[in-house]
Image: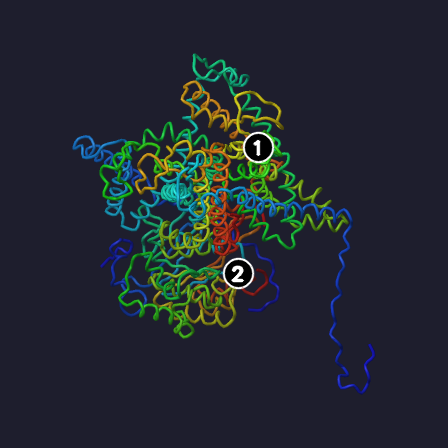
Amino acid sequence: MSTTTLAPVAPPERPPSRRRPPSPVRPHDFGVADMGLFLMCVASSLALAWVIFYQLTLLSGAFGFLIVWYALLLTLYWIATSQVVDRMTATDRVVSVVVVTGAAVILGLLLYVIVWVSAKAIPHIDLHLFTRDQKYFVLVGHNVLSTVGVAHAIVGTLEQVGFAALLGVPVAVATAVFLNEVGGRGTRLIRTVITAMSGTPSVIAGVFIYSILIINHVLGYSGFAAALALFVLLLPLVTRTTEEVLRVVPSGLREASLALGASEWRTVWSVVLPTARSGVVTAVLLGVARAAGETAPLLFTAFGSQVMNPNVFSHPQSALPLQVWTNARSADPILITLAFEAAFVLLVLVLILFVAARVLGRTRTGSRRSRRWRRHDPSILGPFDLQLAPVSSDAPTEGGQP
Amino acid sequence: MTVDTMSPSYLADPDRIRGAGLATAGGAARLEARGVHAWFGGRLVLEDVHLTMERSSVTALIGPSGCGKSTFLRILNRMHEVVPGAQLAGSVELDGADIYGPGQRASDTRRHIGMVFQKPNPFPAMSIADNVLSGLKFSRLKPVDRHELVEEMLRKAGLWNEVKGRLGELGGALSGGQQQRLCIARALAVRPRVLLMDEPCSALDPTSTRRIEETVREIAEEVTVVIVTHNMQQAQRVSQYCAFFLAEENQPGLVIEAGTTEKIFSDPVDPRTLDYVHGRFG
Amino acid sequence: MHVAADDALVGVRPPVTPITVRTDRRTDDKIFRAVVRAAGFGSLVLLFFIGLFLLLRGLPALHVMGWRFFTRSGYQTLGSHPTFGVLASLYGSVVVAVVALTVGVPIALTTSLFLSEYAPIWSRRTLIALVDLAAAVPSVVYGLWGFFELQPNLVGFSTWLSQHLSFIPIFKVVSPPVTSSLFIAGIVVGIMIVPIITSITREVFSLAPPGEREGALALGASRSQMIRSVVLPFGRGGMIGAIMLGLGRALGETIAVAIILGETFAISPHILQHGGTTIASLIAIHFPSGGPRGIADLLLCGFVLFVLTMVINLVASAVVNRSRSGAGVEL
C-alpha cells in the first residue's frame, strides 16, 4: 500500500440508532442468597447455644454463652458454605467474619466505655461541678453532692497543660525543624532517641521531675512541676508528628524560597511552617489531648489537692485525672460520684481536643483540596483505589488529572 | 460430552494437572465478548466491544495508549472489578458460559483465564519453585510430581536453563526479563485455558522479548492467548488476529476494526487503522 | 600549567579537582541553626538525665538491699529490717503484659486487616479516626470502667475458668476471690493497647504493593489467600515492631492497673486470683510513703522500668526499620 497521504475520508457512520449504553453493574460474589445463608447460620448457632446452655444446662454464664455461640457460628458457617459453594470460599468467608468481629469488638468497647462513663456522670451534673471544689467535704458526715465540685481540678488541668504546651511546642517544633530542615550529624541518633522516649511510660516523666527538682527542694509540689513533667511527655510526641508533617511539605517550595535569596530560617519561618500550619496544629492538639489525660506524672509533681489553688508555681494543685484517681479510691459514695463526673468532664475535654485536631487538620482551602490530599494519603486508601490501579496506562485518574 | 468447566469438582479434578500438554479436558478455549462497556467512577471509558478470540489462537489488541485495551483485557478475567468504583456491562463467554453469569465466582474464572502483567510481579518472599507452584496452592490443586511440573513450566517459559541450579533462590533476585518469564511459568502452571498478557515485554530487553514471543508461539496451541501490545512488529510476529482500539478526544474507547493480522496490516478497512499501522500516530 | 615538551607524559593533563564551595552562612542563619541544633540535642540530654537521676536517687536503695533488690519483693521500707525488692512487681508487670498481648494482638490484627482490606472506602476515614480516639481516652477512664463495670462481668468467666480448666496451673485458684487479679488487669490493658498496634499495622498493610496483590488475585486466590500470601508477609516487620510497642506500653501502664489490682506481693502462677503488683502501679500507689528509703526504692524501680521499656522500644524501632514494610512507616 502506498504511503502517500490519502484524501481524508469521513469515518464510518456510527449506527444511526445508537442505543444508550446499558446500565453499569459491579459484579458481586456475595449476593442475597449468601446473606441469607449467613443469617440462617447465625440463627441456628444461637439456637444450638441456647439448647446447650439452658435446656441441657451443660454450661452457664453470659460470657460463656457469647463465646460458645461465636464458635458455633464460625463452624456452622464454614460447613454450610463449603456444602453450598466450595471449601475455599467457606474459608474465605469465615475469615471475613473473624476480621469484622475484631473491628466490631474494639469499636464496641470504645462505645461501651464512653457511654458508661457518661451514663454514670450525666444524671448528677450540675453547675456546682464547675464552681465548687472539695474544701467543704467532711470525711465523715452528711455530705451533699451540691457542696462539692471539681473547679479546682479543672483550673489545675488547664494551667498545667497550658504551661506544658507553652514550653513544649516551641521546643518540639524546633527539634522537628532541626531533624527535617537542618539535619546533619546526629539526626539519626536524635530520631531514635525521640522514638524511644515516646514509648516511655508516663509515670517515669513524673518520677524524673521529682527526682531532679522536688526531692532537693528546688521546686515544691506545684502545678509548674506538673507542667514540666507533661512537657517531658509532650515533647517526643509532638516532635514526631510535626516532623512527619514537615516532611510532606514539597521541597520545591523550599527551593523556590532559597532561590529568591531568602535565608534558611526565613524559609522555614515564612514558607515551610505556614504551609504545614494545619498539620502542626493537629500535632499540638493531639499532644495536648494526651497530656491532659495523664494521671501518673501528676502524682509526683502536682501531688493533688482538695482546694482551689490557682497559683501554679507554689503549693500542690489538683488536676482532673488526678482528682478522678483520688476520689475513685475513696470509700465515700459522694466522692465516687464526683469521680465519675470529673472523668466525664475529662473525657469531654479530650474529645473536644481530638475532634478539633481532626477538623483543623484539614487544609484551609476547603473540600476540593482535602479530597486531593485524601487520595494521596496511602493510609486510608484501599490498595486498588483509582490512583494506584490499573497498573497499565489505560485507565484515567479521577477528575482527569494527568 | 459437555463438561461443566466451572464446577468445583472439575476444578478439583487432579487429572486436569497430570499428563502431557498444558490443558487436558477443556484445552484452549474460545473467548467471546459481547457488548462490553466499562466505567471508572461513573465515567464511560470503553464502549460496546464485540470481539471473539478463537481457540488456540493469538489475538493482539493494538492501539495508542489510553484507549481501553488494558481495561478490556482486565474485564476478560474479572480483574476490572477489583478497582473500587469500576463498573461494567456486557458478557464474556468462555466456551459458551458467561463468566459474569449468576453464581460464577471471580476466583474460579481467574483460574481458567490467567494473566501476565506489564510489570513483572513474582512473589519476592517465595523461592522460584514456590512461585511457579503458588497458583496451585491457591486453587488447592496437587500436582502429581511437583518437580516435574516446575521443570515443565520453566521450560515452556524459556527460563529452565538459567535457573535450574537455583530453584531455591528467591523470586525477587532475578533480572526483569527472568522475572517476567517466571510470571509466565507461574501463570501456566494452573493450566489455564486462556492466557491474557498486558504488554508483557514493554519493560524488558530485546533478548527477553524475543524469548517471550517464542513462548507465546509455542503455547498458542494449548492456550488461547490475548496480548495487548504497543509494538506493531510484535503484533505481526506473534498474532493471527488483531483488534484495533481507539478513543477520540474525551470519548470512550472503541474497537475500530478487528480481523486477521494479515488483513489489518496490509489492507485495513478503516483509514484510522491504516494510519495507525503505518505509524502515523500513537 | 607548563608541561615540558619532551616529558613522557605529554598529552596527559593532571586530574581536575573540584573546588570546595564555601558556605558562608549569614549570622541569622548561624543563630537559627544553633538554636534548632540545641533543641535537637536537648532531647538527647534530657533522656540521659532521666536515666542518670533515676539511677542516682535510687542508689541508696541498692545500698540498703544490695543485689537482693532484684531477688526480693515487698515494700517494707521503714523500721530496722527493711525488705523491699522489685521481683514481684517485675513478675506482675510481665504477667499483665503477656495477658494484654494475648488479648490485644488478635483484636488489633483483625481490626487493622479490616481497616486496610475489608472496610468500604467511604467509611475508612471515620473508622480509623474512631480507633485513634480509643487511644486518646485517658487511662484513668479505662481504669474506672475496668474496675466498676468490666470486672463484675468477668468474675463469672474467671470462676468458670478456675472450675473447669484448673488442670492448667495458671487457671487454678488457691485463694478464692477472683477479683482484682492480674488477669482482669491484663484484659483491660490489652484493650488499651489495641489502638496503638492497630494504627501501625494498618498503615503497614496498606503499603503492600498492589502489583503483587493483583498477581495473587489473577492466579485465582481468594481475598483471604491474597492477604495471607502477599499482605501478611510484607507486613511482618511492621507487625512485630507494632507488637513490641504494644508490649512496651503494656509494661508501663500505671493507673488502670493500679485501680484494678488489689495489691499483694506474692509471685504465683495463679493469675486468676486476687492480688499481684506491677512496677508502675507499685510506684503510683506507694508514693510518697515509705520514708527516704521508700522513695529511693520507688526511684530505683522506676529506673528498672525505664531501662526495660527503652530497650524494647529501641529493638522495635530497629526491627521495623530493617523490614520491607517499615521503610515508609513512622513508628
For the residue marked with disc 1, what is the amino acid?
A: Ala
Residue B129 position, x and y percent, is 37, 66
For the residue marked with disc 2, what is the amino acid?
A: Thr
Q: Chain of mark 1?
A: A
Res B124 label: none
Q: Residues within 10 Å of mark 2 (few under 14, many from 20)?
A: many
Above-or-below relation of B253 to B127: above
Residue A250 shown left or right of residue A72 in the figure: right
Q: Which residue is mark 1?
A: A226
Q: Secondary structure at mark 1?
A: helix
Q: Nearer the viewer, residue A351 or C303?
A: C303
Q: Secondary structure at mark 2?
A: helix
Question: In the rendered view of the protein, which quadrant contains the N terminus of chain A?
Answer: bottom right
Res B273 label: 2
Residue B74 position, x and y percent, is 43, 54
Residue A131 position, x and y percent, is 55, 17
Residue C188 position, x and y percent, is 39, 36
Q: Is residue C269 visible?
A: yes
Above-or-below relation of A277 to A196: above
Residue furthest to the left:
A56
Q: Chain of mark 2?
A: B
